[in-house]
Image (cartoon, rainbow, N blue to C red):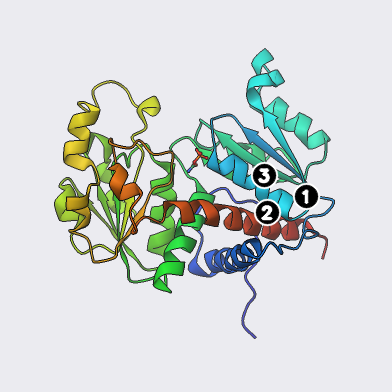
Amino acid sequence: MPERPSVPRHLLGIEGLTAGQIAPFLDLAESYALLSRSRSAPRDALRGRTVINLFFEDSTRTRTSFELAGKRLGADVINMTVATSSVNKGETLLDTASTLNAMRCDLLVVRHGQSGAPALLSQKVEASVVNAGDGTHEHPTQALLDALTIRRHFGRLEGLTIAICGDVGHSRVARSNIHLLTALGNSIRLVGPPTLLPSAMAELGNVTLYSDMDEALKGTDVVMSLRLQKERMGAGLVPSSREYFRFFGLDRRRLALANPGALVMHPGPMNRGVEIASDVADSDQSVIAEQVEMGVAVRMAVLDRLSRARMPS
Ligand code: CP
């Protein structure tokens, strides 16, 4: 009998997950995408469960989609606003975690500016912890939603060439995508200025580094543009936004170097005219809105699968 994939208790990152562990998230998310479109998601899948969104950094897409995902499945969802919480009075991350633990929440969705913060919390609370983005480390649900979007367009998620462009060094999205897409047998090209492209990233599997955007895009199936994360960088890493766009901006001419019909992706939020031209972001090749839609489906699948891991057998 084939072995059933075990359901993880937490989702802290993609690194180390096998193709067999990734696929069940995507398959369940695909079914939730279809059910969401027909407005028939099973509203009792998480009935009686409590989800707390604990975001120490700003978010539009991730926080809203976790909230929608929990509500579509019938969970009680609480958004803890850090700006008005006792964190502002000096309460530590671990004391905040102990407080939430005492309230017996089932799923804790955490975004934090420090890499490793969700992993630390997962050792201190009984809830299942989902990493909603930690520092420059990982953003696992973003990689899952990107993977689902790609799979829906190509009908497969292997043997593709995917360019990840721009501020790779500061990007948790890039790291999670590299782990996921290489685990499934795709080739990754990373392109950006040397100041934003650590050479160690070439050691992450089937990954090639480029400093020339035109070269990197030739013959690619997917072009993923990344936000220039000025809030995480020191001075002098990029000359100016205008100069950056000239060398690393995704415009019509550059997109034409990719394979015909190549997908344009961006995790958001976008800086139009800095890493991506507006007409490319809004073009027929852009699947940026679909990424957002798949974000809800993927987060439904993640909350559902992790909550099943908590059920007594
Ligand atoms: N992609 C992403 O994480 O977007 P938010 O910061 O809006 O959640």
Whether 55 is drawn above or below 164: the answer is above
Left or right position of 217 against 169: left
The answer to which image quadrant residue 30 occupies is: bottom right
Residue ID for mark 2: 303
Residue ID for mark 3: 67
Q: Is the CB of mark 1 within 8 Å of ligand 1?
A: no
- Identity of the amino acid at label 1? Ala
The residue drawn where x is 73% and y is 49% is 71
In the rendering, at what x and y percent does residue 152 appear? 46, 68
Reading the chain from its start, which is encountered first: label 1 or label 3? 3
The residue drawn where x is 43% and y is 46% is 267
Does residue 103 appear anywhere in the picture? yes
The residue drawn where x is 65% and y is 86% is 1
- C-beta proximity under 8 Å, tags 1 and 3: no
Mark 1 to mark 3: distance in Å? 9 Å
In the rendered picture of this protein, how many numbered marks are placed on residues?
3
Whether 229 is drawn above or below 312: the answer is above
- C-beta proximity under 8 Å, tags 2 and 1: yes
The answer to which image quadrant residue 67 occupies is: top right
Residue ID for mark 1: 75
